[in-house]
Image (spheres, rainbow, N blue to C red):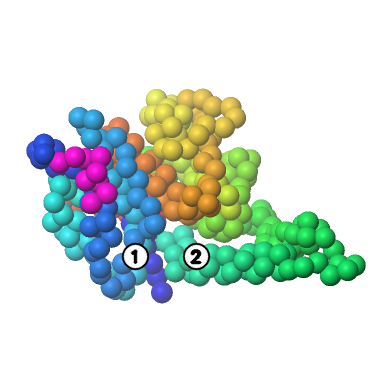
Amino acid sequence: MNKSDVVIEVTPDTSNEELDWDKHWDVIQQSIRDIKIEGLRWAKDFALQDFVYGLKKLLVVCQIIDSKVESTAPVVEKILTIPGVGGAEMLTIETAGSDWDQNELDEKNAKAKKEKQEKAAAKPQAEGAPSKKAAKKAAKKEDEKEEERVIDEDMLKKDADKAALSCKESAVFVTGCNLSDGSGASDLSREQIAQIMTMVHEKAPDTVLMITSAGKTKVSALVVVPPNKKGTLKALDWLTATQLVPVGPQGDDEAYGEYPCAAEKDEFPIKVKDVVNSQAFSFLKTAGLIQDESEDENYDVEEEEGADY
């Protein structure tokens, strides 16, 4: 069953001066979640960003089943009917990096397993049995052993080949590395993402590229501006337009950042990566580096957006 991740930008009705926007965004978010369409699922979290006149705009993330939701137009139209909404526009649509339904099931199973371990640890200790601390440590090691995953050169190369094929004709591009990071299974290092970047630029040397990764505990991204594209944009400016925090050496031609995700705050790398990608896309759009679909009725989303589709 094919699914797609969609990001929609929702802007406020700036002509309505009576609304208390500090509170009304909560109303709008709930109204959006109340929209029910078969095959449509809303993300757990939406993101508010600075807009104009001290107001905010909302980035809405959802996942759709392609065979049941053939167009995002009905979703956008329903959002536009919500009081206080001034505009709604699809920013990105890309093949889903993971199945949210399966993710939720995995989270429930992991929670149940943790509760079972905690109950077992809380039982009175039998004579000669290992201490609770030792039992907990052993359980943790067992979990790490079960979840151990090796990232090999073949994974990196396949991600690079896929990205190179997609971005060959693009001036700027945002892509992921779903095979290497396992869509939330493994944290990639800067060096591993740089390996993918180098292989992509061997086949697409003229593309200014951002590679994002949704790991096990964090979201990370590397931006590289090729030598023959200096002046197109500054790598650090693009990176810091997202919620990623710069880590290590930075510059106009190369920048790297990370965002540690806190599971206890319901911050999951896959969802955070969706937001980071939409923020990266918004920067390109604002900078005039990609075409606004509203300016061209023949606009091709997959050709011009520069996202990993």
Residue 22 colored magenta?
Answer: yes
Q: What secondary structure characterizes most of the magenta part? A: helix
The segment highlighted magenta reads: 19-27
In the picture, residue 247 is in which quadrant?
A: top right
* Horizontal side, residue 119 vs residue 288: left or right: right
At 57% from the left edge and 65% from the top edge, which residue is drawn? 111
What amino acid does circle 2 point to?
Answer: Asn
* Horizontal side, residue 277 vs residue 146: left or right: left
At 31% from the left edge and 47% from the top edge, which residue is drawn? 59
User: Is residue 31 visible in this depiction of the protein?
Assistant: yes
Give the image location of residue 254, x and y in percent.
Answer: 52, 31
Q: Which residue is mark 1?
A: 41
Residue at the farthest right position: 128
* Horizontal side, residue 136 vs residue 20: left or right: right
Give the image location of residue 66, x and y in percent.
Answer: 33, 69
User: Is residue 205 visible in this depiction of the protein?
Assistant: no
Q: Quadrant of the C terminus?
A: bottom left
Observer-nearest of 55 and 271: 55
Q: Quadrant of the N terminus?
A: bottom left
Residue 47 colored magenta?
Answer: no
Give the image location of residue 96, x and y in percent.
Answer: 42, 61
- What distance separates the C-alpha of mark 2 from that of mark 1? 13 Å
What amino acid does circle 1 point to?
Answer: Arg
Q: Residues within 10 Å of mark 2 (few under 14, many from 20)?
A: some
Q: Which residue is mark 2?
A: 103
